[in-house]
Amino acid sequence: MDNISFEDFKKLDIRIAEVKDAVEVEGADKLIKLTLEVGELGERVIVSGIKDWYIPESLIGKKIVYLSNLETKKIRGVESQGMLLAPEDNEGNCVLLIPEKDIETGSQVH
C-alpha cells in the first residue's frame, strides 16, 4: 500500500460507537446490519461482512471502533453510513477492535 500523509490521516473521523441493534441482512450470507450510537453524531447504521465470526445478538452492547466519515453506500438495500474497524488474523478470522476500558460513545480516536 502507498503511504498517506498525516494531513490525509487527519481527514479520517474514527470514533467509539456502541452497538444498539444487530440483525442479519435478509438474503445475504455474510452481512449484518448494525445500528450504532455515536455520541454527538447520533444514531448511525452500517452493514458489515462479519456474520461468519459473530452472531448478531452477541454484538449488542459492545463498543467498537467506527469510521464515521466514509462515503455512504447502499448495500443490499441498506444505506451503510461508515465502517467498523476489524483486523483479520493469519487464519482469516475477523476480530473486532474493542476499547480496553469503558469510554464514552462518540469519543474520537487519535
Image (cartoon, rainbow, N blue to C red):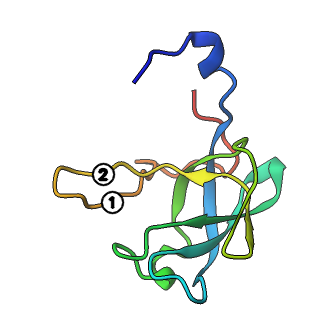
Quadrant location, the C terminus: top right
Task: Compute the Cα span from label 2 to label 1.
Answer: 5 Å
**For mark 2, what is the residue?**
88
For numbered disc 1, what is the local secondary structure? loop
Q: In the picture shown, does residue 100 fall above or below 30?
A: above
To which quarter of the image does residue 37 belong? bottom right
Residue 30's x, y, as percent? 45, 76
The secondary structure type at the circle numbered 2 is loop
Name the residue rendered at 62%, 62% in the picture: 18
| Residue indicated by mark 1 | 94
Q: Are marks 2 and 1 in contact (CB under 8 Å)?
A: yes
Residue 79: quadrant of the picture: bottom right
Identify which residue is drawn at 44% across, 53% down: 98
Give percent across and percent down for residue 15: 64, 43
Left or right: 44 as drawn, with respect to 88: right
Residue density around tag 2, few if under 14, some if 14–19, many if 20 or more, within 10 Å: few
Q: Is residue 69 left or right of residue 15?
A: right
Disc nearer the start of the sequence (2/1): 2
Q: Nearer the viewer, residue 42 or 5?
A: 5
